[in-house]
Image (cartoon, rainbow, N blue to C red):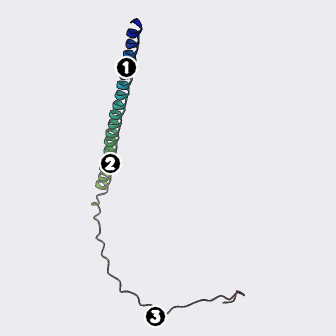
């Protein structure tokens, strides 16, 4: 009788330990996910700030020069007429090395 009670208590303790370990693992995984998301957000914010700083510095330099910002030049390409190849030259080398 005592043996059965002891075994049940041992099993229940083992189950509680497994459950606690599983909960700890889930909590660690969630913390890692949350930390990763926070790191990504922070990195994005820093990159956005750097981009804004670069743009503002570029605008300040242009304002100091008094030159308006360059406008993109539209690319106009004229279609080239197709080439007619009526002749070709062949160069033949003999085994003696003569052409």
* SS label for mark 2: helix
Residue, disc 3: 86
Circle number at residue 81: none
Against 18, residue 52 (above or below) is below
For label 2, the residue is: 51
Q: Residue at the right extreme?
A: 96
Task: Label 1: state its secondary structure.
Answer: helix
Question: Which residue is rendered at x = 29% and y = 65% of the image?
Answer: 72
Mark 2 Cα within 10 Å, few/some/many (few <14, many 20+)? few
User: Going from the N terminus, do you reach mark 3 or mark 1 first?
Assistant: 1
Residue under the image location 29 percent in, 69 percent down: 73
Please provide percent x and percent y for residue 39. Answer: 35, 37
Q: Can you say which quadrant of the picture contains the N terminus?
A: top left
Q: Which of the two marks, 3 or 1, is nearer to us in this view?
A: 1
Q: Where on the picture, by quarter, is residue 94?
A: bottom right
Mark number, residue 15: 1
For the point 30% across and 56% down, the residue is: 62
Indicate left or right for 93 with 58 as reference. Answer: right
Percent coordinates x, y for residue 81 in the rendering: 35, 86
Q: Which of 18 and 31 is in front in this view?
A: 18
Frontmost of labels 1 and 2 is 1
Going from the N terminus, do you reach mark 1 or mark 2 first? 1
Q: Residue furthest top?
A: 2
34 vs 49: above or below? above
Image quarter where the C terminus lies is bottom right
Percent position (x, y) of residue 83? 40, 88
């Amino acid at each position: 009788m005592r043996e059965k009670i002891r075994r049940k208590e041992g099993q229940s303790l083992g189950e509680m330990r497994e459950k606690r370990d599983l909960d700890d693992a889930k909590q660690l995984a969630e913390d890692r996910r949350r930390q990763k998301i926070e790191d990504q957000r922070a990195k994005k914010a820093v990159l956005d700030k750097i981009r804004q700083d670069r743009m503002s510095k570029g605008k300040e330099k242009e304002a100091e020069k008094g030159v308006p910002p360059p406008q993109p030049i539209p690319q106009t390409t004229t279609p080239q007429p197709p080439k007619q190849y009526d002749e070709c030259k062949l160069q033949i080398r003999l085994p003696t090395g003569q052409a």
